[in-house]
Image (cartoon, rainbow, N blue to C red):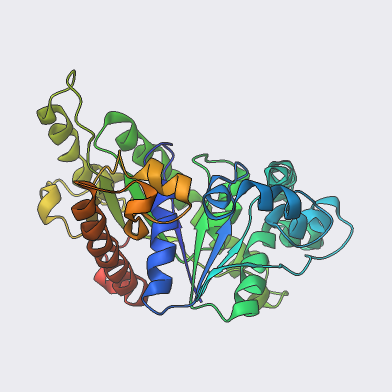
Amino acid sequence: MKRLVLFNNKGGVGKTTLSYHLAYMLARLGHRTLVLDYDPQANLTSMFIEDEHLFANYASLIDGTNVAGCLEPVRRGKGELRSPRLVPIEGGLWLLPGHLGLGQFEQVLAEEWPKKTDTNNERALDVTTALDQLCLEAGKVVDAEYAIVDVGPSLGALNRAALLACDAIVFPLAPDLFSLQGLVNVGPNLEIWRSDWNYVRKEKMKGRAQENLPHHEFRPIGYIVQQHLARSDRPVAAYNEWAQKIPDTYRKHILLDKSPEMAPDLEKDSNCIGTVKHYASLIPLAQQARKPVFDLKHADGAGGGHVLSVRRSQQLFEGLCQSILVRLENPSSAIAS
């Protein structure tokens, strides 16, 4: 099972919305797809599940109906992971819901991370690898081909553990200063986390079965740019100026390529998976209907000029999925560090 996470240190760039639509499209393309909500805010879960159903069935931490419930015995040091109970969304698509209680696991992760190289401290490794193990167990339940992991925008211990459970990262971006700064912040941290964990696996844990430790490299496979939403007080040229800075910023700070050559323009950059239209008028309709944009009907409020946008959105997300699949299955097709 290949695991993908969409990540940026900057919030509000469409990460969760993209994860939601890509998950649906992967399933529609015939791939058994698992979604794990590792964001304590659980926004992705609320996009999939009606509030009444959510409150009635996923508020508890006493069973495996949500991420926090599965991890609770590990957090308290009183047992192993609970077996995950997945929610079927539609044919070929399943969700392990998030829970605000997952935030309590972050402190434990932060406390145990410095102890990960202590050869006599099994708990440190069990805690650090719990999110990876949960992903593995959930994937086995439905024989998933792909897993999409949703995380928050922080660079904290919880996201570090979540990324250790992933094979690849896609970076959602907006054409603005803060998205670029997010890349600048994320790049060095990814390299430190990867280096630290490889050190644990290769040097310190020679006496422990290596197959019990995650070997995922959470390699960058590209970025997706959300097009700007036109504003009367900010000209299009300003957005284009920031957009053209993305390729070089990505190359230098995510791929850690310090060569003096300038990266190509956004339109020609092989690291750019695609651009996504800002569906400002359709996303609220989709959220209210709890369905992806490309499933909206006239009864959902998508009439008139929306019809063409709905049709085009299906082509867009199908193209994004196909490109991501190529990069996941053939890492050499994406420029990696």
Q: Position of residue 79 (x, y in %)?
A: 87, 63
Q: Which quadrant of the figure has residue 235? A: top left
Q: Nearer the viewer, residue 14 or 77?
A: 14
Residue at 10% across, 55% down: 268
Q: Which quadrant of the figure has residue 183? A: top left
Give the left or right position of residue 118, taking residue 268 as reference: right
Residue at 86% across, 55% down: 77
Q: Nearer the viewer, residue 125 or 145?
A: 145
Give the vertical position of 89 relative to 288 (above or below).
Answer: below
Q: Residue furthest front?
A: 299
Quarter containing the C terminus: bottom left
Q: Residue furthest top?
A: 233
Q: Position of residue 294 (x, y in %)?
A: 32, 59
Give the left or right position of residue 162, taking residue 110 as reference: left
Residue at 27% across, 62% down: 314
Q: Residue furthest right?
A: 78
Q: Position of residue 133 (x, y in %)?
A: 67, 68
Question: Is residue 121 at all visible to an observer of this figure?
Answer: no
Q: Position of residue 327 (x, y in %)?
A: 31, 70
Q: Nearer the viewer, residue 254 or 222?
A: 222
Give the left or right position of residue 71, taking residue 309 as reference: right
Give the left or right position of residue 126, taking residue 319 as reference: right
Q: Nearer the viewer, residue 318 or 292?
A: 292
Residue at 73% across, 57% down: 127
Question: Is residue 231 at all visible to an observer of this figure?
Answer: yes
What is the total number of numbered labels drawn onto the structure image? 0
